[in-house]
Amino acid sequence: MSTNIGVILKDVLDMKIEELPGGVPEPEPDQVCLSMGPVGICGSDVHYWQSGRIGDFIVKDPMVLGHESAGTVCAVGKDVKHLQVGDRVAIEPGYPCYTCPACLSGRYNLCPEMKFCATPPIDGSLCQYYCHKAAFCFKLPDNVSLDEGALLEPLSVAVHACQRGKLSFGQKVLVCGAGPIGLVNMMVAKAGGATVTITDISESRLAKAKEMGADATFHVTSRDSRETADNIVKLYGFSDLTIECTGVEASIGAGLWATKPGGSYVQVGYGKAEVNFPIVAVGIREIDIYGIFRYANCYPKALALVASGAVNVKGLITHRFPLQEAIKAFEVTKAGTGVKVIIDCDK
């Protein structure tokens, strides 16, 4: 039996690289087994490592991390018809029940029975071999790399956010936060014909955003949300659509104040469970606020954006490590010294 090495979160602050029980897994009839390639580290992976929970999702037993991933099919379940051994695929990391009202309405991301990689108690894909529902594995065309396939996961978050905010051609879009999620939202908004201003407290992240296509950047230096918004509006005007990607209370307030009357605001970033924000201003200015949770039916659109060249996600990758150096990769991500850190499970 071949071994299968993975990155396991044993407990808070206790992460190990070790052999997974059972060796290489056998796919169920509706699954494929994948020889894993690149896996990106998400902020949620770091949060589980550092805190052991995100909201009501609590790590109670050892869990394999990782959900931004791509790999190559090495075995196929007997009921799978659209994939074969050797196909390179991007993995949409969650699969729903298919039968609840949310699933039947097309909003399967809200399925109460969703099984999502590296969300307790479901194991993730940061290992050498991993089985997943074939229906949620998307074959990559020859001009799309495995790295790009792995990055379809955060890109799908941005596709969903822009759809929820009803992005349209010619809009002014304000993106709050120039981390990985802010950057993919900027790129999707640009691909949708918007002019994008992006904010951050880090000048180096703003420089990266400018390099990747931001029309304008704004360096946040004040904790006063109204002051920040006033300065943004003075320079660039009100936004038609604001996409907030930090979850920081001051940034949420600034984003709302900088949105035009009748405009739209999408909350992507998560921070504190409860925040103060200018509810009266939201009401009397009729700002439409949208929440998002992951994505639904967005992987094919994200793949089309990459395959067509409309969006280039490769520039997000700043660091990469072999599987045996995964803990070092997590330390780099935690330190915030890069944008997107990749772990190569096949090296």
Image (tube, rainbow, N blue to C red):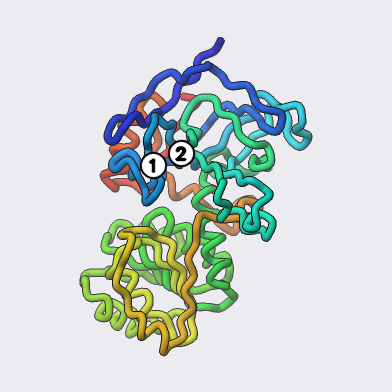
* Residue type, label 2: Ala
Q: Which residue is pictured at 37% across the width and 58% down the height? A: 270
x, y (%) of residue 343? Answer: 43, 34
Q: Nearer the viewer, mark 2 or mark 1?
A: 2
From this view, report whether residue 144 is shown above or below residue 65: below
Q: Residue 153 — which label?
A: none
Q: What secondary structure is found at the residue carrying circle 1?
A: helix
- Is residue 76 left or right of 329 when viewed as pictured? right
Q: Which numbered disc flags the more N-terminal residue, 2 or 1?
A: 1
Q: Position of residue 254 (x, y in %)?
A: 32, 75
Identify which residue, 58 or 6, lies in the foreground: 58
Q: Which mark is residue 118?
A: 2
The residue that label 1 is drawn on is 45
All told, the count of numbered labels is 2
Residue under the point 25% across and 80% down:
227
Q: Nearer the viewer, residue 69 or 1?
A: 1
For image coordinates 43% across by 84% down, the residue present is 260
In this rendering, is residue 147 above or below 228? above
Q: Residue 79 sits in which quadrant? A: top right
